[in-house]
Amino acid sequence: MHDPIWDTPERLALRESTRRFTEREVVPNIAAWEEAGALPLSLHRTAADAGLLGVGFPEHVGGAGGTAVDTWVIAEEMIQAGGSSGLLAGLFTHGIGLPHLITAGDPRQIDRVARPVLAGDAIVSLAITEPEAGSDVAGITTRAVREGDEYVVTGAKMFITSATRADFITTAVRTGDAGAGGISLLVIDADSPGLEVSAPLKKMGWLCSDTGELRFDQVRVPAGNLIGAENSGFLQIMQQFAAERLSLAVQAYATAQRCLDLTIRYAKERQTFGRPIATRQVVRHRIAEMARQVDVARTYTRAVAERWQAGDDVIKEIAMAKNTAVFACDRVVDDAVQLHGGMGYMRESEVERHYRDARILGIGGGTNEIMTEVVSRLLLA
């Protein structure tokens, strides 16, 4: 059944082009990229040439136009054509690294950072999380002290997506007093003297998405690299969290749908005791339950996303959508591995990759527990 907003003629064409791109460029190479621990920059250029990398960003800054829904259509189709949420994290890191800068609208920053990133010639990452501050964004301690026409940055960041490949890093720093009101955003060149980037961290999943630690030791950053007004960083970060959380919810239900599709195919082909396992009630009922959870997660997340796109205040509902989709994904990927049996435990099985990759979705962008706290506070305010 087609959704009138998510399956317009233009978005059906976008789905088709995304599927062709994924089947041609991603599926034959993703296992090798996971072994390498990162994506090649050439993939970014290829995605830009295919008209996918800049979707969701205005044409006047070098993007391809479209809305957040178009980016989620790409995410759905890329996963369902054989990609993964880890692939999306590495290829579309600019989805979290650029919006603050583009919203601020400084033409020099847009020309120097946004245009080459959206052309696939450079990579930008977002650095917020610290060793002692994850979900507590207001607690960050990386300090930026103004000295003339520069900021001097000292501190550390961890779990930073695409950090080891980044050319630019949108970085949350403390320019004022303690708390949310003292945070600013700076775009920092990755080759700045005093900035140390770790080797890629070894993770459970998202293996083709490199993750690193950053250490800033008296890193001098031009004052012109300040994104927006000084001490407005917390608000800028919070304004972008809604889109990030919805994106993770979309990735969760898309991953669940892909695992459901793979499991249905496998259940029809795999035979035990002379007949396909799809003929056995215990298997059929588990698949039916998988389908129910996928459908509920997709339907609710899309409904919330449409309200958010229309400008409604849906912070509570976004938190509920993320948890709904994540919980469904956790259950479905687990069932998919179980129904694939021993093959589901093998690296050559696609459901094994999704099982590993899905685990981060309930942590990134606000943990399940933080989402529940957001809901409870707004319900009981």
Image (cartoon, helix red, strand yellow):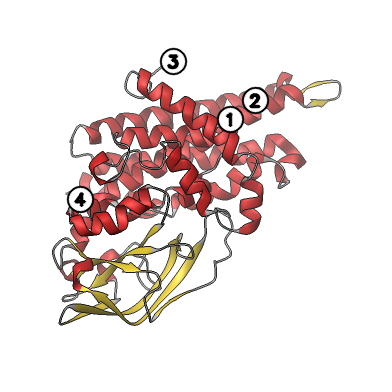
Rounded to the nearest angstrom, the CA distance separating label 4 from label 1 is 38 Å
Determine whether label 1 and label 2 are within 8 Å by CB: yes
Rounded to the nearest angstrom, the CA distance separating label 1 from label 3 is 17 Å
Name which residue type carries label 4: Thr
Q: Is residue 19 visible?
A: yes
Mark 3 Cα-neighbour bin, 10 Å: few <14, some 14–19, many ≥20? few
Rounded to the nearest angstrom, the CA distance separating label 3 from label 2 is 19 Å
Disc 2 designates what residue? 264
Residue at 75% of width from left, 24% of height from top? 269
Determine whether label 3 and label 2 are within 8 Å by CB: no
Disc 4 designates what residue? 103
Locate residue 116 relative to residue 104 in the image: left or right: right
Q: Residue furthest top?
A: 1
Rounded to the nearest angstrom, the CA distance separating label 2 from label 4 is 44 Å
* Image spot of residue 146 (x, y percent): 18, 80
* Image spot of residue 171 (x, y percent): 31, 66
Mark 4 Cα-neighbour bin, 10 Å: few <14, some 14–19, many ≥20? few
Name which residue type carries label 2: Ile
Name which residue type carries label 3: Met
SS assignment at label 1: helix
* Image spot of residue 380 (x, y percent): 20, 47
* Image spot of residue 8 (x, y percent): 35, 19
Badge 4 or badge 1: first in the primary sequence: 4
Rounded to the nearest angstrom, the CA distance separating label 1 from label 2 is 6 Å
Badge 3 or badge 2: first in the primary sequence: 3
Mark 1 Cα-neighbour bin, 10 Å: few <14, some 14–19, many ≥20? many
Locate residue 113 relative to residue 22 in the image: left or right: left
SS assignment at label 2: helix
